[in-house]
Amino acid sequence: MHVVLSIIFTIGLCALGHEATLQMFPCRFGGMEVEVKLSPIPPEKLRGLPQKGEGDLWYGSITLGNGADTTITMAVWEGPEGPYVWLDGDNDEDLSDEGPGHWEWHKGWERFLWRYRVNVEYRENGRDLHEPYLLRIMARPNYDAENPPWYTYSICPGSHRRGVIDLDGKNVLIAIGEADFDGVFTPEELWVAVDTDNDGKISFYPYEIFRPGEPVHLDKTLYEVAFVSPSGSYIRLRPIGERPHPLPILSVGRVFPDLEAKDISGKDFSLAELRGRIVALFFVQESFLDLVCKGDGTKVCRNQWSHVCHRHRSIAEFFSDDPQVKVVVVLTDGEPPRLEKWRDPDLSWIVIWAPWALEDYRVGTQAFVIDEAGVIRYSDELTAHCFSCWACPRYETSYASPLDILWAIRRLKEAH
């Protein structure tokens, strides 16, 4: 059995059997930036070169697509108010019909940002075609430069393909994108997102997005990418097996599925046995916390996420004598935990080691507040992260602070 999705860029959305009509969407998340090297010599013969004030024009090239002409040329002029960028968006080697682009200055990031729509040339089934592609160009001041150019330039993709696919007789929203950012879609570099919770939208939560090489989960069925066209205009999925249980949908308002394991003392544990109590449930990936808490040379990483390192302990200390609240810590690393770190006679928390939860629940480091009926009432906000930066965490997370979690627990206590 093959499941087919045909993707055509038009305005509107319509499913016809196993085929769908799609449109391009801008990405909600940032991907890896690729630096563009500048030269005073154009990478290809150009017409209609822009005329500005004093100073040289600099040229860079962006490689997109797999057609005969994969080079998209950009020209840069650096003026007193900042850089100007011309991009050959229609790929006709003529810059006279290209404006300098409207830029945005992001003060906190110290960068200029341009957004462009370009026509990318593809070769598919013996014919040439052009498909739109959204990208962003960024310029940051290079304070170490002794000669022009005075800025460093990089590109970042800004689009993905989205539509409807027929899976097991159900019309399901699907989105696809390429992880190496060259505008060419291949099964090896393809991420896939599906509307697993059936809420009518792609949320880019961990239970809806699957990295390159990962099977796509829908209910109990696992799929793999059998084929995708270079332009992303056609994709075929095929079922390859089943999960023993449906993929858990860990979103606010849903019942958290039972979790059974042994705690670090060897006692049997079942999350269902805590019904009737408020549970602060922390999934903790120690390898990630070591990266965040000890620092890896990334100042933003340490400052932005430092509170995640000890929040489970802070909440356990605060509610250590409260019979209505129980703190559970689930360690998800593949390596056995350092037991001396987690055995604390002053804390009444439950600590279990469940490395399988990383894939079965698709969580690494995340917090949940669960009410007496087992319903998720609060959790960290997770969105898709950079897909080719494997040193980064799987998802970019807005981690709740201890005060956020405390507030959520107190609200539940006050409701009763």
Image (cartoon, helix red, strand yellow):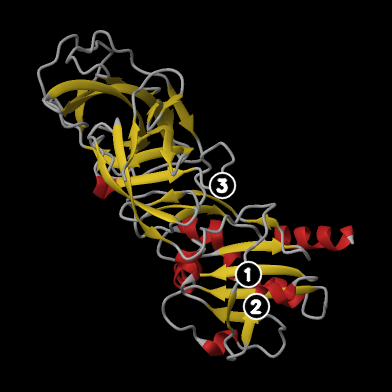
190 versus 346 height, above or below: above
Whether residue 175 sits left or right of residue 361 in the image: it is: left
Name the spot of residue 213 as percent of width and height, x first.
30, 55
- In three-dimensional space, the C-alpha distance between marks 2 and 1, rounded to whole angstroms, equals 7 Å
62 versus 313 height, above or below: above
Amino acid beneath label 1: Asp
For image coordinates 15% across by 10% down, the residue present is 47
Pick whichever of labels 2 and 3 is earlier in the sequence.
3
**Mark drawn on residue 188:** none
Residue 308 visible in the snapshot: yes
> Which quadrant of the figure has residue 133?
top left
Mark 3 lies on residue: 197
Mark 2 lies on residue: 270
- Asked whether the beta carbons under mark 2 and mark 3 sit within 8 Å of each other, the answer is no
Name the spot of residue 246 as percent of width and height, x first.
52, 59
Question: Which one is in front, 357 or 312?
Answer: 357
